[in-house]
Amino acid sequence: MPRIGGSYSTSDLSRKSGDIIAEALRHPVTITQRNKPRLVLLNIEDYERLMRQSDVRAVGTLETISDDLLAEVEAAVDAYADADEVGR
């Protein structure tokens, strides 16, 4: 039943769905169509872990920015303001 790398065709999925689902509960399974990977079947715990990892966002504020980076931002703003004054 198992193929190399846990890969099955869409035809296999139609004929052996129970076995393929049982395997996907243990590790991700690739579903191919016309010999190209098209889908991945994985258990809910792996899916939820991937979703949590993909939603990690870094939020920065003036209070959390490093002093060096803040100095660079201030210098860039000052340079932009100076260039704007010269252009008027």
Image: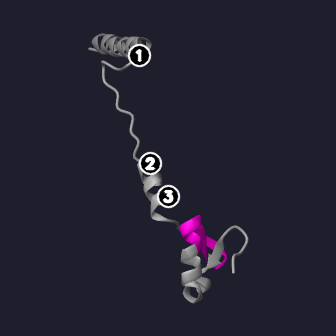
Earlier sequence position, callout 3 versus callout 1: 3
Separation of residues labelled 3 and 1 (CA atoms): 35 Å
Mark 2 and mark 1 residues within 8 Å of each other at the beta carbon? no
- In this view, the mark in front (3 or 1): 3
Separation of residues labelled 2 and 1 (CA atoms): 25 Å
Earlier sequence position, callout 3 versus callout 2: 3
Question: In the image, residue 65 lies at what x, y percent?
Answer: 37, 19
Question: In the image, residue 24 lies at what x, y percent?
Answer: 56, 70
Look at the picture and state if 49 lies above or below 27: above
Q: Residue lying furthest bottom in this view? A: 15
Q: Is residue 26 visible?
A: yes
The residue at which mark 2 appears reads as 54
Separation of residues labelled 3 and 2 (CA atoms): 12 Å
> In the picture provided, is 29 more to the left or to the right than 50?
right
Mark 3 and mark 2 residues within 8 Å of each other at the beta carbon? no
> In the picture provided, is 74 more to the left or to the right than 68?
left
The residue at which mark 1 appears reads as 66
- In this view, the mark in front (3 or 2): 3
Tell me the amino acid under the disc marked 1.
Answer: Ser
Q: Residue 23 is drawn in which quadrant?
A: bottom right
The residue at which mark 3 appears reads as 46
Element type at mark 1: loop
